[in-house]
């Protein structure tokens, strides 16, 4: 094996999409894990700050999807798995539209008195069973491979639902406004906890900061 063309040591909020313009011309990259942590930083623990961070990430992904660096129409030098990975980065915020529909339909059925499926037959129940078993197995594999406790995994799922119905949806709307109307997007920088006292390390965890991103999950 020859030496890599360069080592990409980018860190930061846009790191997931930074490699797309470099991979298009054929640059190769390596994933380096040092024995000791090369970089350390703090992440926001407050829900509002965390949602703003997810919004910034998702907006960057939407911009990549609508840019000339879209992996779907990218260079032929992109390998198949690279194309799939970068395409996933650009598409995942759009799943918020289907997630909103999934969360809204049960409420619609409750208020209208009509079930979302007209008739329950064997075919529908078989599909439902297959999907349920598949999702359960995926969840078990996530817990096993990540090595986290079941409670931590469940909290992560809760935040995924909150972020998916708020920050991701807002990112899609902002991205469409920028592409169609040319409206520039202003980011809200996330504040990192700077407390050095061990007693204050989780001081911001339970602080409630209002944001419009709370409206869709509510």
Image (cartoon, helix red, strand yellow):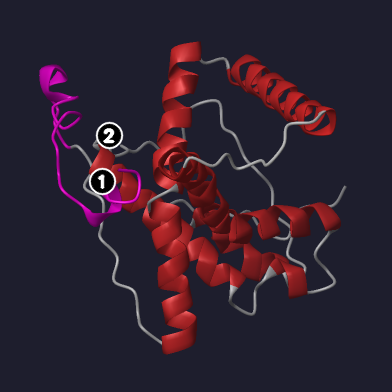
Quadrant where the C terminus sits is top left
Verify CB contact (< 8 Å) between mark 2 and mark 1. yes
SS at badge 2: loop
Circle 2 packing at 10 Å, graded few (<14), some (14-19), many (20+), is some
Question: Residue 59, position in %: x, y?
Answer: 44, 63
Does any portion of residue 9 appear in the rendered image? Answer: no
Q: Residue furthest right?
A: 1
Question: Residue 48, position in %: x, y?
Answer: 24, 44
- Please tell me whether residue 21 belongs to the stretch shown in magenta: no
Would you name the residue on which mark 1 appears? 49
| Left/right of residue 91 with respect to residue 93 in the rendered view | right
Label drawn at residue 106: none
Question: Residue 75, position in %: x, y?
Answer: 79, 74
| Left/right of residue 76 with respect to residue 146 in the rendered view | right
Specify the segment rendered in magenta: 194-218
- Residue at x 48% of width, y 30% of height: 157
Label drawn at residue 45: 2
């Amino acid at each position: 094996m020859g030496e890599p063309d360069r080592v990409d040591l980018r860190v930061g909020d846009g790191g997931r999409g930074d490699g797309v313009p470099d991979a298009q011309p054929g640059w190769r990259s390596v994933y380096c894990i040092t024995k000791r942590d090369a970089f350390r930083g703090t992440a926001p623990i407050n829900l509002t700050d965390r949602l703003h961070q997810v919004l910034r990430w998702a907006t960057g992904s939407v911009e990549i999807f609508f840019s000339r660096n879209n992996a779907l129409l990218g260079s032929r030098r992109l390998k198949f798995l690279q194309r799939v990975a970068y395409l996933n980065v650009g598409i995942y915020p759009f799943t918020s539209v289907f997630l909103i529909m999934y969360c809204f339909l049960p409420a619609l059925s409750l208020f209208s008195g009509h079930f979302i499926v007209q008739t329950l037959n064997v075919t529908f129940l078989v599909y439902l069973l297959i999907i349920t078993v598949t999702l359960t197995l995926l969840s078990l594999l996530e817990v096993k491979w990540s090595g986290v406790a079941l409670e931590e995994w469940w909290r992560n799922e809760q935040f995924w639902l909150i972020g998916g119905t708020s920050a991701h949806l807002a990112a899609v709307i902002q991205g469409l406004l920028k592409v169609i109307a040319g409206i520039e997007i202003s980011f809200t920088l996330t504040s990192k906890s700077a407390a050095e006292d061990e007693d204050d390390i989780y001081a911001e965890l339970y602080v409630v900061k209002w944001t419009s991103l709370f409206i869709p999950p509510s």
